[in-house]
Image (spheres, rainbow, N blue to C red):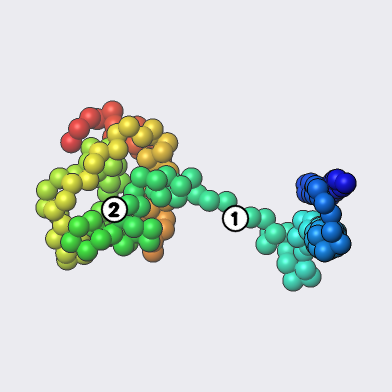
Amino acid sequence: MRIFFVFHFGNFLIWADFEKPCMKETKTFFILVLLILGVSCSSEKKGPPRMTAKQTKKDAKPKSTHPGKVLYMQFCMACHMENGEGVPSLYPPLTQTEYVLGDKKRLIETVLHGMEGPIEVKGEKYNNIMAKLDYLRDEQIADILTYVRSNFGNNAEAVTVSDVRTVRAAGAK
């Protein structure tokens, strides 16, 4: 005698095929089915989060990520680290330094044309190569540099697409 059971619960499909069913196998199978059914029926369906009395609509909106942050994480973080602190003796920090807060043109040139040779940042000497990122679009470079100049404890004027376009048109330094 052969007994075949199929149960369908939403996303679950359970089947059993007993060639020679015995009471123990059948009982175990039905207990398993009831457990799955109980778990699937008792799970709460969560809707959108409800606002509490202390929340305002402003609080409920998700914070948008600066487009420069996404690009920074992709192109700069490996050397300058997520927090902009760099790596001592290898890659200089981007936190409150003359290079970041100073002349925008020099900063844009560094990104476009790279940098090689010794420099001193915050009293520490660095002598490593920064690859040129001239393959990035003007808007991407402006976004990255604006992000850097307004984060990591920095508070400097934004870098515009026009700033980058002007420096790029002037050619290599």
Q: Tell me the SS state at disc 2.
A: helix
Question: Could you give the CA–CA distance between mark 2 and mark 1, rounded to whole angstroms?
Answer: 26 Å
Q: Is residue 161 left or right of residue 102?
A: right
Quadrant location of the C terminus in the rendered image: top left
Across and down, in percent, residue 94 comes to 31, 57
Across and down, in percent, residue 9 comes to 84, 49
Q: Amino acid at mark 1?
A: Lys
Q: Is residue 116 visible?
A: yes
Q: Is residue 89 left or right of residue 17?
A: left
| Image point (11%, 48%), residue name | 117
| Image point (82%, 51%), residue name | 20
- Which disc number belongs to residue 113? none
| Image point (23%, 56%), residue name | 91
Residue lying at the far bottom of the rendered structure: 54
Q: Which residue is mark 2?
A: 79
Q: Nearer the viewer, residue 14 or 1?
A: 1
Question: Badge 2 local density, few (<14 within 10 Å), some, or many (20+)?
Answer: some
Q: Is residue 135 left or right of residue 42?
A: left
Q: Is residue 146 visible?
A: no
Q: Tell me the SS state at disc 1.
A: loop
- Which disc number belongs to residue 63? 1
| Image point (29%, 53%), residue name | 79
Q: Where 73 falls versus 41 (above or below)? A: above
Question: Badge 1 local density, few (<14 within 10 Å), some, or many (20+)?
Answer: few
Which image quarter: residue 4?
top right
Sequence-wise, which precedes: disc 2 or disc 1? 1
Which image quarter: residue 161?
top left
